Amino acid sequence: MKKMTIEDKLFLVKNNVDHDHPHIKITGDEKDLKKGLEAMTYACPANCYTLEGGAVKFAYENCLECGTCRIFCDEFNNLEWNYPRGSFGISYRCG
Amino acid sequence: MADEQMKFDVVIVGGGLAGLSAAIKLAEAKFEVLVIERGEYSGAKNVMGGVLYRSPTEQIIPEFWKTAPLERNITETRVWMLTEKAATTFGYKNNDSTNNSFTVLRAKFDQWLAGIAEKKGATVLTGNTVLDVIRSNEGKIIGVKTDAPDGDVYADVVIAADGVNSMLSKKIGLHKEIKKDQVALAVKEVITLPQKVIEDRFNLTGNNGATIEFMGAISKGMVGVGFIYTNKDSLSLGMGCLASDFAKFKIKPYELLEEIKEHPAIAPLIEGGEVKEYMAHLIPEGGYKSIPPLVTDGMLVCGDAAMLVNGIHREGSNMAMISGKLAAETIIRAREYKEYSLRTLSYYKQLLSESFVFSDLKKYKDTMSYMEHNRQFMNIYPEIISDAMNEMITVDGVTKRQKEWKILFNTLSKRNPFGLLKDAFGIGRRMI
């Protein structure tokens, strides 16, 4: 089977992005990598967290709403995590 | 003003297996029920492997198999221990053991279940996210706030069936945040293949199906289990590992999935398939010790939100449905007392502890953390077994007695006698 990138995979997910309302925000220091953020550059299954120039950049648009980042960052209080507004976000067709 | 309040007997947060099971039972008992689901439809946000069990489902909907969107009837269960190149396999196949479990795709199944709930008289409101509870002056939960305009809904009882993340029970302080070693992060793909190809590759007849669970070198030392389940014309392939392990081992879940697909035992099964969907979800694997308080004044917690998953036996859907049913029974009994208080609702905990749910979760309460601290079960033992198998099947003139010695020396070079004894005792104590 042909290798798939994460972009290939995310392309397959139906996602009604709530453009003006990010449901997750980094509220702490994006350069403080130890506080769960660097860990998310590995653990996030949608690659929403990437390292750029010593800081973690976060993009919520591809989020699969799994909750892993909230759990990782909970003790550091540097993430604001909500569900997307009703009917926004992902809609799995198989699940 | 009071006349304009939207009021139901019971409001259920989350239209998944737990919530809809409760809704069906309550609607049958003539309660006015509202299910609030944040997805575009029931199942839109839901993922499981996914094996659905007959017995609990039948307790919610008798003869569900006549109309439910089931994929395949599981008649074969396989377990694979993988090394990088090899697989030691174990399985049980019995074409007479039909109707014990079925594979399902949750987006389809949950929509069907929501339809049943509606037919029974429940109202299912989709596309609305519940933000918080509403409390009386005395602190009792009397409803929920949703993100719809004028979205306050009142109820005698609220059921939180809002899944593993259960923002509601966290918001009200009932449940502290889950720890990162109490959840597995699972990624999964649905891979389409022609029905005939699946039946040939898995040696299946009719709508019978097979499940494969695999573990070993493939998780690279992480504590986790992978799976391939046969659907009608697709395969569900995925892997769940302790969420904390992905960070500890610096492994990206979607890259792991790609490596799994290349394993020599797995690649031929999926060859030529087309990936239809990719998904990720958390599985509450914290077990008995991680169960939050399940009852508060005016609210009950069910399913994944209550951390009711038996990870050792891949059981979760059954516990979700049964907890939903028991929550409904609790509320039906509370109506007889004309009192929806902490006192009457606490009966839910009693019902759960009398059922298989608490009993099974107690039995395996230490298994996950034991595995986390004894990773030899994930990497060393599959290798030892594979080496032994390879030695024994290789015909090369070496006598069988000599081969036995070779196997023993190889085993002892990987794990000393004390370690072997400790492991045998340790795993035995936590599994049996």
Image: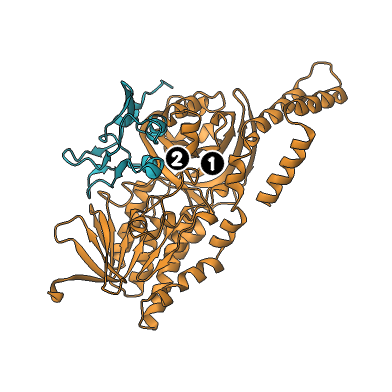
Q: Amino acid at mark 2?
A: Leu
How crowded pointer 2 is (Cα within 10 Å; few <14, some 14-19, many 20+) is rated as many
Q: Which residue is at the front of the view, B199 or A7?
A: A7
Which residue in the structure is indicated by mark 2? B185
Q: Earlier in the sequence, mark 1 or mark 2?
A: 2
Q: Residue B173 at x, y = what percent?
A: 37, 59
Report if residue B237 is visible in the image.
Answer: yes
Chain corresponding to cyan in the figure:
A
Q: Residue B285 at x, y = what percent?
A: 50, 48
Residue B211 badge: 1
Q: Which residue is at the front of the view, B227 or B397?
A: B227
Secondary structure of the residue carrying tag 2 is: strand
Above or below B300: residue A61: above
How crowded pointer 1 is (Cα within 10 Å; few <14, some 14-19, many 20+) is rated as many
Residue B256 badge: none
Please give left or right for residue B95 compared with residue B303 in the image: right
**Chain under callout 2:** B
The quarter of the image holding the N terminus of chain B is bottom left
Above or below B163: residue B49: above
Residue drawn at (43%, 66%) of the image:
B325
Q: Residue B197 at x, y = what percent?
A: 47, 31
The color chain B is rendered in: orange
**Chain under callout 1:** B
**Mark 1 and mark 2, same subunit?**
yes
Disc 1 from disc 2: Cα separation: 20 Å
Above or below B140: residue B324: above
Q: Amino acid at mark 1?
A: Thr
Please identify the quarter of the rendering in which residue B65 is found: bottom left
Q: Residue B356 at x, y = what percent?
A: 56, 62
Please give left or right for residue B236 compared with residue B335 in the image: right
